[in-house]
Amino acid sequence: MSSRKKIIGTIGQKDLVQMYANYVSKYKAGFFDSLGLGVVQGKRKELIIKMLEGSTEGEPPLELIDCHTSGGVFNLGHHHTEINKALIEGLEAGLDIGDHHLLSEQRALLAKQMADLLPGDICKTMFSVGGGEAIDLAIKLSRAFTKRKKIISANRAYHGVTGFALGACASNFKDPFLWNLPDFQQVPFADIESLRKTIDEETACVLFETIPATGGILIPPEGYFKELREICDDLGVVMIVDEVQTGLGRTGWMWGIFGGVYPSEKIIPDIIVLAKGMSAGVYPLSTTSYKPQFDDIFEDDPFLHISTTGGSELGCYVTRKMLDIVSQPKFLEHVQKRGTQFGEGLIELQEKFSEKIVDVRGRGLMWGIEFEDEFTSLLFTLTMIKNGVWCDYCGNHKVTNKFLPPLIIKAMDVDEVLKRIGVTLKEI
Ligand SMILES: Cc1ncc(COP(=O)(O)O)c(C=O)c1O
């Protein structure tokens, strides 16, 4: 008998949903309760998230293959042995969050490791807790550096819920908060003509995801980012790339912008933002990495931008272990192979179910299936959950369902997911 203290499953599902409604959000609780699928997360291990209880009494809890991974948080699956070991090791060695004003060995070591992996001369890194904050900092850097205000992003974008990041999001995320600010302008993703009409010498930065996830797993045409880089250089505009979902091996390359979308297209932006997977699924951490010239912004006041819990020493130690794993050429090769297997499988299914599926697109282990309408797409999500796969539709392109399985997924598990997609397509 394990002497481990029971922490997961101390409250029954029904009571928990009620407690959630009372103390967290009645709307969120109501939404998930109305699905009737029993989707309160319980134990998880590797690829699997086991639900707390079945949907009705007597039903076994669903065991879902995690193809959602919170957008790439669980790149190494749930409870990767080496990550758990690093967390415990770090704690036992005496690491904690650390004092944010003092210099930190772990932050320095992680930043150096990042500099060695990041494209070109991007070599400085500042730390935050979540992706939104890290995007905020990227925008702040661009404004302080250029002394310009205008920010251009994509009109279906999602970059986080904090101030500057929210401003760069699609209007549905910001309108309820009266945050439609004049300095934030938006263009359709990868539409170079719209961009040319909007960008000018008043523009501080352009901010784009390499492959917009919430926007519908959009693959830019070849040459787009190269042209964007040239336009930015001509006008002195800072190029920020949000690699929160596409970074850290997701595309089968370390960085989406540097070979991950088109192997022959290796673009060096000015700033790269990372989050989600940087946590290795256990300790929140995000980063804003930039070219050395941005450092001069802090000449007069090195404490101009600080984050108390950003860059926790314990988190940095865990992230270093995660980077050791995902940056191995063998690991990236594995992602490429499994990605090809996944993509080819989806294309076969598209041919078989061509009356339902409009398009299949992706890179590495990041794929989208676009359906003919939103109803089919929503039904697909629900039926996939019932059939034991956790994936969902893109928030700002609901006709598209997205798949971001853990990067450690094995060939037989890719086959299993494809089989369940096939079953689901038949059922719907
Ligand atoms: C592309 C992208 N950027 C930024 C963020 C914001 O990250 P966070 O939720 O950690 O603030 C997200 C979150 O989903 C994201 O998908």
Image (cartoon, rainbow, N blue to C red):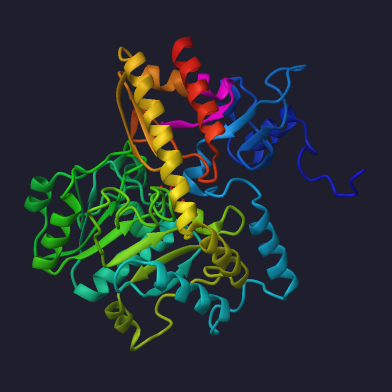
In percent of width and height, residue 265 lies at 22, 54
Asked which quadrant contains residue 235, the reply is bottom left
Screen quadrant of the C terminus: top left
- Viewer-proximal residue, 389 or 184? 389
Instruction: Please report the residue visible at 36 percent of the width from the left and 22 percent of the height from the top.
Output: 348
Screen quadrant of the N terminus: top right
Residue lying furthest right in this view? 1
- In this rendering, would 407 be left or right of 86? left
In percent of width and height, residue 212 lies at 32, 44
In percent of width and height, residue 230 lies at 12, 62
Q: Is residue 342 above or below residue 329?
A: above
Instruction: Please report the residue visible at 55 percent of the width from the left and 26 percent of the height from the top.
Output: 416
Q: Specify the segment rendered in magenta.
A: 382-393
- Viewer-proximal residue, 55 or 272? 272
Asked which quadrant contains residue 33, the reply is top right
Q: How many marks?
A: 0
Q: Would you say residue 236 sits in the magenta stretch?
A: no
Asked which quadrant contains residue 49, the reply is top right
